Image: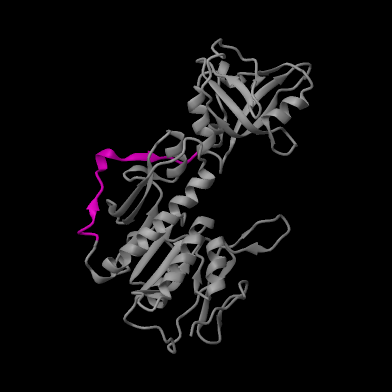
């Protein structure tokens, strides 16, 4: 059976052959497989790599499927980011994927860097993967790593590759207003990714990244599970999988915090609305207001929006008003005359609220959006 050592802050080797990796004075468990393991040698040995909640959900589903009587694989190990302190005075906590691994008793490696020689040695000699699966792991995988599993490394990527290859695929696809969107299961190789299965799905014009990301990972996980028998049997390989057209690659660059500013003076309502959708997880979006008689500019978080079909807001103005119908939000007329409706906002030092509540709190004071100083330069 596997033996997982939970003590994480001592060095050396414990009884039963369990060593620990020490990186930057932080020690995390590394678990060796016992010679008494009763795992079937006929099943492919899968190592899962991931970190956040969406990956944890995928891991749970993969473990569940591995326990079917006719399963062709078993999950023999997990690799995730090291524990982090979630609270200022709290102890370091395992990542969501790490917590799922602990719940199911799956051996876990937590290297500071996936290129560390000690980590790669442990992976190769202890876990001995036949196949690796990555889902939002968050680290670059070296050539040595990719050459290790005989069936390769499969990745769940939430975009219609090669469009939006990179760090922020869902955020960038929503920001661009893409419809449909999709998820790709692919082999990860050093030079060029090769697709195994791609699922395309329509998306609501108001759907945000917080709901789209887990939805796509759920679809991607099921697609991966459907493909595993062909991968393990050798019917589907890196050589037979469809190669991506590098000429059609669109990069999903990392998001900068400054991108969350709604530049209503030179962006359309649709552009602003799609930024709210795409950046709902991080960094969020903000708009700056001038409230009558107030000395300071109020930077307000914008939580949800929509682009209403209106005919009576044609004049360009920076004056913000409340909609005329019940349930309407704050109507912001953008620089091109289009209208962005703010349905939910969060003022400084307050809880989120609907647009009507924010309006009522103004008590009749005039509200205007303002151009940020750096935009005027």
Whole-percent x and y of residue 345? Answer: 66, 33
The relative height of residue 82 versus residue 305 in the rendered view (above or below) is: below
Q: Indicate left or right for 313 with 43 as reference.
A: right
The residue at 50%/71% (across/down) is: 108
**Hey, which residue is sitting farthest front in the picture?**
326
Whole-percent x and y of residue 9? Answer: 62, 71
**Hey, which residue is sitting farthest top in the picture?**
315
- Judge whether residue 272 can be spotted in this image: yes
Q: Indicate left or right for 146 with 168 as reference.
A: left
The residue at 71%/60% (across/down) is: 90
Q: Is residue 241 magenta?
A: yes
Quadrant of the image occupied by residue 24: bottom right
The residue at 42%/70% (across/down) is: 65
Quarter the C terminus occupies: top right
Q: Closer to the camera, 342 or 275? A: 342
Magenta extent: 238-255
The relative height of residue 76 versus residue 329 in the rendered view (above or below) is: below
Q: Is residue 178 magenta?
A: no
Quadrant of the image occupied by residue 219: bottom left
The relative height of residue 163 versus residue 268 in the rendered view (above or below) is: below
The relative height of residue 239 versus residue 29 in the rendered view (above or below) is: above
- Judge whether residue 140 can be spotted in this image: no
Q: Closer to the camera, 20 or 102? A: 102
Whole-percent x and y of residue 244? Answer: 26, 47
Q: What is the basis of the colouring in this image?
A: one colour
Q: Closer to the camera, 276 or 107? A: 276
Whole-percent x and y of residue 66? Answer: 41, 73
The residue at 71%/55% (across/down) is: 88
So how many labels did they put on this image?
Answer: 0
């Amino acid at each position: 059976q596997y033996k997982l050592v939970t003590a994480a802050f001592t060095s050396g080797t414990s009884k039963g052959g369990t060593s620990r990796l020490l990186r930057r004075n932080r020690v995390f468990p590394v678990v060796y497989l016992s010679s008494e393991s009763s795992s079937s040698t006929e099943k492919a040995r899968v190592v899962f790599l991931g970190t956040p909640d969406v990956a944890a959900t995928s891991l749970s589903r993969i473990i569940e499927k591995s326990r079917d009587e006719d399963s062709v694989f078993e999950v023999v190990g997990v690799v995730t980011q090291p524990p982090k302190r979630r609270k200022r005075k709290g102890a370091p906590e395992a990542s969501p994927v790490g917590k799922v691994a602990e719940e199911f008793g799956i051996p876990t490696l937590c290297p500071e860097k996936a290129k560390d020689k000690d980590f790669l040695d442990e992976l190769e000699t202890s876990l001995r993967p036949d196949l690796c699966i990555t889902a939002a792991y968050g680290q670059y995988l070296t050539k040595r790593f990719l050459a290790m599993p005989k069936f390769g490394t499969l990745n769940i990527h939430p975009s219609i590759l090669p469009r939006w290859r990179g760090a922020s695929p869902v955020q960038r696809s929503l920001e661009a207003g893409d419809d449909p969107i999709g998820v790709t299961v692919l082999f990860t190789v050093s030079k060029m990714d090769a697709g195994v299965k791609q699922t395309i799905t329509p998306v609501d014009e108001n759907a945000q990244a917080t709901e789209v990301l887990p939805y796509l990972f759920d679809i991607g996980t099921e697609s991966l599970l459907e493909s595993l028998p062909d991968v393990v049997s050798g019917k589907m390989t890196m050589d037979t999988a469809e190669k991506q057209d590098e000429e059609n690659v669109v990069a999903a660059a990392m998001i900068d915090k400054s991108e969350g500013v709604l530049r209503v003076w030179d962006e359309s309502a649709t552009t602003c609305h799609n930024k709210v959708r795409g950046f709902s997880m991080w960094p969020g979006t903000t708009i700056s207001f001038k409230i009558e008689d107030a000395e300071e500019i109020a930077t307000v978080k914008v939580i949800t929006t929509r682009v209403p079909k209106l005919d009576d807001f044609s004049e360009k103005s920076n004056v913000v008003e409340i909609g005329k119908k019940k349930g309407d939000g704050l109507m912001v007329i953008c620089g091109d005359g289009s209208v962005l409706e703010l349905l939910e906002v969060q003022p400084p030092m307050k809880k989120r609220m609907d647009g009507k509540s924010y309006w009522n709190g103004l008590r009749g004071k005039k509200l205007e959006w303002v151009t940020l100083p750096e935009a005027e330069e």
